[in-house]
Image (spheres, rainbow, N blue to C red):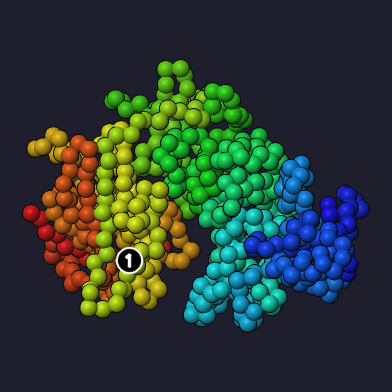
Amino acid sequence: MRLINTKTFQLEEYFDSDIPEYAILSHTWGKDEVSFQDIQTLSAGPRYRDRVIGKEGFLKIKYVCQQATRDGLDYAWVDTCCINRSSSVELSEAINSMFKWYMQSSKCYVYLSDVPSDYGVPLDTQAGSSVEPVRWRRPSKYDALVNGPFARCRWFTRGWTLQELIAPKDVTFYGSGWNFLGTKVSMTALISTITGIAQRVLRDSTNTKESLRSICVAEKMSWAARRQTSKVEDEAYCLVGLFGVHMPILYGEGKAAFIRLQEEIIKRSDDHTIFAWNYCDIEQESQYTVLAPSSSCFLKNVVQWSRPRNSGPYTMTNRGLHIPLPVISPSSGSNKTCLALLDCHYEDDVTGALAIPLTPRSDNTYDIDYDSSRGRVVRVDLGLETRAMTRDLYIRSQPNVPDRGPQLTCQFNIDQDDSRAPSLSIMEYYPSRIWDAENSRLRLTSNDSTSLETWAAIKLQDTSGRAIGVVFHISPQRMPERTSTFGVHGWIYMQTMKAEVTLSHLVDQVIRGCASASAYEYGNHGTYTLALGRRHTMVASNTFVSGNDSQTLLNVTVADRYAPCTLRRVFGASPRPLKTVEGAPREKDLRTSVSTD
């Protein structure tokens, strides 16, 4: 391990037990960083020294060395200049050791270059035990923190900085002028809100590894779900320390790195939540694989049972995942789909287990039976476990994917009053892989027009900063009077959203309560509208336009003005309520109107 002498700025190398106490830097890379080769030229003469000192990245090194000296430390570690990246062997060793290096540091300084030098987190939100109550006592101040420069800084969006937040025992945050912002301990609740990481993990600095062992794979993956890396492979490499695994570093392998990461996790863990990934922004082909293509696929609210129920050893083989699982077979009919019960459940639901729908094959293997209308993982009531029989399964890891076929296009519009400034804007689409953002269109393809059923969502924002999630269920159906034409059927759900809630999580919440949402159904040849709220009316309307064997078109419009009549006037009764979702509008706040051709 190479360390910078904080007094001479020279690199010194130490091994194992000889490594002295040191400070370590966590930051986001800029365009003009000081490299391993650069720092070695500091003593080569004024010409070289001035060139290195003039680099923008040298200021960070200077800040770190000065702060380390004030903290009584003689050495510091900075990733830009302490690793010889021209050596693939050294780079691989460094990546596999990174978590350990951060965990063993005496001090970790987080430098946030995009947080202004005059910005500071209010002191009354920094006491560890008083942060959370501030959210309720003074919501305006807490909201300002959650949406302020600190919360929005780039550091919270990068993949590598996740382990740099969790691993060190002593973390201090500094702004662009090395202005003190706070510590990990003093801002635990705020950081937890920003990152989604459990507060107990952030607080437990004495035994980080033990604390991480108590967290299931799916939850740890969800922490990285919204983070980004410059290289595709780094999505996996930045997580090796978090899961306590080691793997060869092979830049150029692309998305295969994330598959290898999960294979290494499986070798050391019996945690079934690694298979409980669901909705994510990926190509359709990946929904049929056993292992997830990205951390963005994992749901935060999936946990293991407190006591193992269906646990048994499992391995990845050349035939796929070999695993013994309780299987519920179809009772009758032509449906061959069976349900393999996993040893996990939704965190807020102890009455149901999660299962993977499987389709048996003639060679005694199984394919994952993915359906966009229900997702890749389904909930099964525990009462059905009595029908399950444990089977020795081989679930194919790379099954054949159905050929693509007919297409459905959904046109999304915002209807605004031209006489005043726009009051609505589209902030996010889900899933973005099938959204044409430039033309506000959603495109779906399938081998069978009747299986184009899917869920999609859009996040809107009004001028007050309020976020609104619009989730719609799209289900093309063949029209009996015209066998070559497909209509559109489904329903729309709308609710205000908290800043930390993702569209994928909102879709998951809605799906889990969709059985009682029939009152909001829409069908062919009509215009259907759904309004949200009394004072700030939001309207979603959708109209069937046309369809044929190759394409079906659905038009969806959101407007910011409407005077809706009540559901009771339209239907003669109130609708059955959806399953309660935090932040959802109450039944009395929902309005709808229907007009048919």
| SS at mark 1 in the image | loop
Q: Nearer the viewer, residue 515 or 24?
A: 24
Estimate the x, y position of residue 556 in percent, counting from the top left. Answer: 24, 57
Point 17% across, 51% down: residue: 544
Q: Name which quarter of the figure residue 233 lies in.
A: top right
Q: Nearer the viewer, residue 96 or 229?
A: 229
Q: Nearer the viewer, residue 553 or 224?
A: 553
Q: Is residue 419 visible?
A: yes
- Which quadrant: the C terminus? bottom left
Estimate the x, y position of residue 322 in percent, counting from the top left. Answer: 56, 26
Q: Is residue 462 left or right of residue 32?
A: left
Estimate the x, y position of residue 350 in percent, counting from the top left. Answer: 48, 48
The residue wearing badge 1 is 585
Point 55% across, 29% down: residue: 321
Estimate the x, y position of residue 567 in percent, counting from the top left. Answer: 18, 63
Q: Is residue 320 left or right of residue 84?
A: left
Q: Residues within 10 Å of mark 1 (few under 14, many from 20)?
A: some
